[in-house]
Amino acid sequence: MKIISNRALRAFASKHPAAHEPLQGWRRVIEKNGFGNWAELKRTFNAVGKVGELTMFDIGGKQYRLVAYIRFEKQIVYVKAVLTHRECDKGAWGS
């Protein structure tokens, strides 16, 4: 799958250096695989959930949340937000 965009991951990691490795690990798994549907994605990522049309990944032992819109048919992941657990709980990622 292709990620749009890794820039969001790097920007978040520049503010939260401990997030760099977990986020880039997530990126590598996404980019090395193709997921045809939600079930395939869920088999690879246990800590993933759906919020409406968005997908929320727990990253780094649930320290961070990555919110994305996934187009399985096009094999594209659009990163909407990367947040700390606390920011996510406050609804900082929007709808």
Image: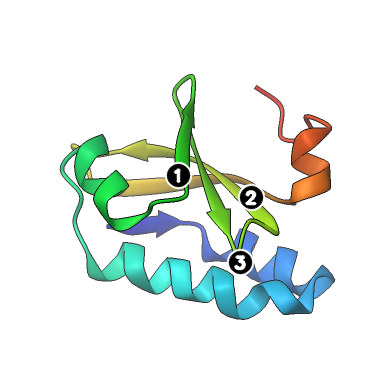
Q: Amino acid at mark 2?
A: Arg
Question: As displayed, is residue 43 above or below residue 7?
Answer: above
Name the residue nearer the viewer: 42 or 23: 42
Q: Residue at x 61, y 66 (%)?
A: 60
Question: On the image, numbered disc 1 is attached to which residue?
Answer: 48
Q: Position of residue 9 (x, y in %)?
A: 61, 64
Q: Amino acid at mark 3?
A: Gly
Q: Are marks 3 and 1 in contact (CB under 8 Å)?
A: no
Question: On the image, numbered disc 2 is attached to which residue?
Answer: 65
Q: Position of residue 67 (x, y in %)?
A: 57, 42
* CA distance separating discs 3 and 1: 12 Å
* CA distance separating discs 1 and 2: 9 Å
* CA distance separating discs 3 and 2: 9 Å
Q: Amino acid at mark 1?
A: Val
Q: Position of residue 59 (x, y in %)?
A: 57, 60
Residue 10 image-quadrant placement: bottom right
Name the residue nearer the viewer: 60 or 35: 60
Q: Residue at x 68, y 56 (%)?
A: 64
- Could you tell which of marks 3 and 2 lies nearer the N-terminus? 3
Question: On the image, numbered disc 3 is attached to which residue?
Answer: 60
